[in-house]
Image: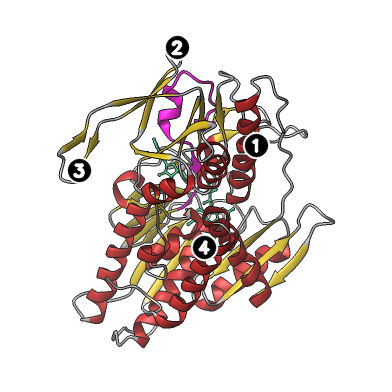
Amino acid sequence: MNKIVVVGGGAGGMELITKIGKRLGKTGKAEITLVDICNHHIWKPLLHELATGSLDEGTNAVDYQVHGTNNGYIYQRGALTGIDRENRQIILAPLYSSDGRLILNERRLDYDYLVIGIGAISNDFGIPGVKEHAFTLDLTEQAMTLRERIQHQFMQHATGQRQGKMKVAIVGAGATGVEMAAELHHMDHTLRRYGYQLEKDLLDLTIVEASDSVMPALPKSDLRKAVHDKLIEIGVKVATNTMVTEVSETGLSTKDGNFIEADLVIWAAGVKAPEVLATLGLEVNRANQLMAADTGRTLSDERIFTFGDCACIPQPDGSFLPPRGQTARQVALMVGTNLIRLNSNPNAKMDSYIYKDLGSFVNLAHFNTIGNMFSFFHGGLQLAGSPARFVYASLYRRHILALHGPLKGSMILMIHGLNRLLRPQLKLW
Ligand SMILES: Cc1cc2nc3c(=O)[nH]c(=O)nc-3n(C[C@H](O)[C@H](O)[C@H](O)COP(=O)(O)OP(=O)(O)OC[C@H]3O[C@@H](n4cnc5c(N)ncnc54)[C@H](O)[C@@H]3O)c2cc1C
């Protein structure tokens, strides 16, 4: 029986493991294992909501161990640190508790087919001070640490123990930065409703962007303008064409010689694949992404596949797939189909992936949602407000349905809907 190991249970990995777990694991056709450094899954495009407390990790997290038992796969907690390709084994780093105690020694897991989908981490582009002084949103733990820091700062202002404006700088005006800015303003509004005595216009929030526009990846300039105008309307300052050269404890230095004061810096300026990928003996590009064919198979090893933010997959026009939730999911599911075929016939013909941009949406908390649908067809259909919010939310709905099936998934979504009505809008502890 083949052993299939998937490393990374993120936006793409969870849909892949559920698919092959049900088709191969549950039916005894293959042994399926998921490896992840975390013990639970939260859909990454929601991390900014986790960081402000809009999202409750208790009701949204999926426990890998339990999900694996219900869906035909084994879960192993650990961080991928190496591959022994000769013996077809992956190596997992020793696991330590948060107070530094050794829990598990280094382990090796056998594989016949290996899939690597460990996502991306923030790229600091070697800019001094980012690692030391800026917050990033790569993992649940980072979002939770950031939440604590934001909440403490609001509390200090509410009790008068911190004076003046609450100065926040977000570097990067892509989806993460823009959505985080809107969430922070939403948090500011909501805390006032919960009785926090906050000075008028307390939040002094600047988004800093090196290119000439917010949301540079949005296909249409009028959409980018709509996002820009909404940000200004809710009180966000937008500094485009501004290159950060250094981050310090008190703010950002920029290439044009200015200094933007900030008590809190959030770094959302771009991503690269985790450094470990460059140490595995597999071909990678400059952003550490694994070089792969459009079937998801890595160029270095026909038994190793990849997808999502950590994969560099070419398209017929010579471009490469963008690091987005949409592509992670679609390629992961295609890799699942290919593995199901290979499991019964090692020479089976495999599917290839051609990217069709189904659209991009940006959710500005409760202020507005703006985006474009079916961008591949005559430039697509532009949406804003409730219809856009519905489409945006449907991406997460589809993810939940894929993970839990139509019946349980619908019940979970109903509970999420009820929670939004019944629970406080912000989780403050
Ligand atoms: C705040 C925010 C908002 C976003 N909004 C959007 C959006 O609106 N639209 C959109 O298309 N995209 C959005 N994205 C990007 C989107 O989240 C990613 O493109 C998508 O999650 C990539 O999926 P993935 O499966 O490749 O990786 P991920 O979802 O990042 O999953 C990677 C998994 O690998 C695990 N892992 C990491 N390293 C290791 C290791 N060494 N060993 C074992 N496991 C490991 C991680 O714990 C994680 O579970 C957003 C991202 C953020 C942070």
Mark 2 vs 4, N-terminal side? 2
Left or right placement of residue 301 versus residue 147 in this view? right
Q: Residue at x 41, y 46 (%)?
A: 69
Residue 97's tag is 3
Q: Element under label 1?
A: helix
Report which quarter residue 311 is drawn in.
top right
Residue 206, given in percent of the width and then of the height, sits at 45, 65
Q: Is residue 85 above or below residue 115?
A: above
Tell me how far mark 2 sits from mark 4, CA to CA.
42 Å
Q: Residue at x 55, y 42 (%)?
A: 16
Q: Which residue is mark 1?
A: 337
Q: Mark 4: which amino acid? A: Lys
Tell me how far mark 4 sits from mark 1, CA to CA.
23 Å
Magenta part mainly helix, strand or loop?
Answer: loop
Tell me how far mark 1 sits from mark 2, CA to CA.
26 Å
Residue 274 shows in the view:
yes
Residue 86's tag is 2
Indicate which label's residue lies in the foreground, 3 or 1.
1
Q: Element under label 2?
A: loop
Q: Which residue is mark 4?
A: 408
Q: Mark 1: which amino acid? A: Thr
The reply to whether the C-beta atoms of the residues labelled 1 and 2 are less than 8 Å apart is no
Let me know if residue 273 is in the magenta part. Answer: yes
Q: Element under label 4?
A: helix
Left or right placement of residue 134 versus residue 294 in this view? left
Taking the view exactly as shown, the residue that stands out farthest to the front is: 27
Q: Element under label 3?
A: loop
Which range of residues does the magenta coloring cover? 268-289
Specify few, some or many for label 2: CA neighbours under 10 Å numbering under 14, 14-19, or 20 or more: few
